[in-house]
Image (cartoon, rainbow, N blue to C red):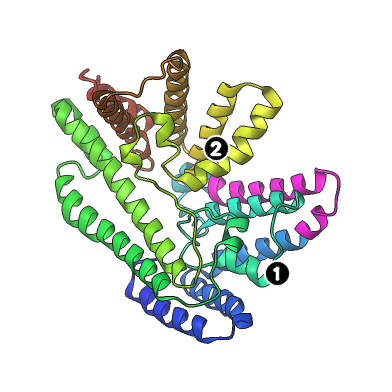
Amino acid sequence: MTHSKYFFGLLVIFSVIFWVLPYRLRIWFLVLASSAYLMSIDPISTIAAGTWGLAVYILSRWTARSASIGPVAAVVLALLTFLAVFKYLPALALPVATSIGLSAAVIPLGISYYTFKLVHYAIESSRRNLPPHGLGDFLAYLWLFPTFSAGPIERMDHFLENREVRWTTSMITEGLTRIIYGLIKRFVLVELVLAPLMATHPTIRHLVVGLQDASILDVWRYLIFSYLVAYLDFSAYTDIAIGCSRLFGFTIMENFRLPIASTNIAEFWRRWHMTLAGWCQQYVYMPIIGWTRNPYLAIYLTFITMGLWHAASLEWLAWALYHATGVVVYNQWARRHRGSRAQPSVWKRVFGTSLTFLFVSAGYAFTTAHGQATVFDSFRVLVAAIGVRPLL
């Protein structure tokens, strides 16, 4: 969606018109341009997002005046129910639909992203934490077309406080540079470099079929390349979204900060998909800590939320439990060794980075299995990665 000639042609036209218009008309032009582009891609998803957005915007004016948490809780529950019905129920019903000859339901475009943005907006509005803004600002935040389908999960306060009102050459240079970075990642590193290297096992199904004959190096090559492709692909779309938004004067939140350089799994989750991790920390982890005082429960439920945010499947649930266990084990180890004030040596940092890299790579046995293999197949791949020949 964000790397077609159609997209970039409209981007140039929209950005030129945006800056030519008087300031008071710009935000509404961006709203109309974004909605028109999204309508041309997926009208049903665009209308659904707009309908829910307007409802949340109107209801948030009411919840901000209420001293009770009941109204905002009802809004949040309605949003999460909407997400569950249109994203998760079709996935759960797919086996039944397939068995009786029905086609799978289509998940609305960008539903996970804009639902979490609306939940954030509803909660922060009720807390009166948002800067003053109008309907145009809100709809631009919701519909901004470079970020609609692939994030980041922008915060409303950050969106309002990090935009420029005057055109500058540096702003355009920064935007174009970021777009170029994203295109290089997507079309050079992923398509030209990594894709041919994965030709032996392009999917986990191919790997599982030949697992009895695959070497440990074959398994690790598949897992590591899967991680690198996912990172470069996802961060490429983020780069493009941030660069395109910069052309309209907006500085969108960063989503990645070189996660492959993380020295431990806790640091990795401060660098990877940072807007999703930050959302879950604020609206899942912190409330659970406040209610239960149990950090382990909070960690596991946070990662389960992140797993289900991606998809309602056993594979993503297993991925969530895998990463949550890694964070819990690391936190326990770090707590026992926190008395040491000495800076870790270069070799310790290299070891930590390598171990974290391999741990995250191994987790792609679960995520690449979604829709292609079973959780059992994922565990077979993990067992093969540590040198144990899996049973058929």
Q: Earlier in the sequence, mark 2 or mark 1?
A: 1
What residue sits 64% from the left and 50% below the top? 120
Residue 86 within the magenta-colored segment of the rendering: yes
| Residue 44 marker | none
Residue in front for this viewpoint, 33 or 205: 33
Q: Which residues are magenta?
A: 60-89
Q: Is residue 7 left or right of residue 275?
A: left
Amino acid type at circle 2 is Thr
Q: Is residue 51 left or right of residue 172?
A: right
Q: Are marks 2 and 1 in contact (CB under 8 Å)?
A: no
Residue in front for this viewpoint, 39 or 158: 158
- Circle 1 packing at 10 Å, graded few (<14), some (14-19), many (20+), is few
Tell which residue pokes out farthest to the front in this image. 342
Residue 76 placement (x, y as % from top left): 70, 47
Instruction: Name the residue tied to disc 2.
Output: 305
Residue 266 placement (x, y as % from top left): 44, 30
* Corner quadrant of residue 223: top left
Report, in whole angstroms, how far the alpha carbon at label 2 lies from the one at label 1. 31 Å
- Circle 2 packing at 10 Å, graded few (<14), some (14-19), many (20+), is some
| 140 over 270 or under it: above or below | below
Instruction: Name the residue tied to disc 1.
Output: 134
Secondary structure of the residue carrying tag 1 is loop
Secondary structure of the residue carrying tag 2 is helix
Residue in front for this viewpoint, 216 or 246: 246
What residue sits 64% from the left and 81% below the top? 24
Q: Is residue 81 left or right of residue 380?
A: right
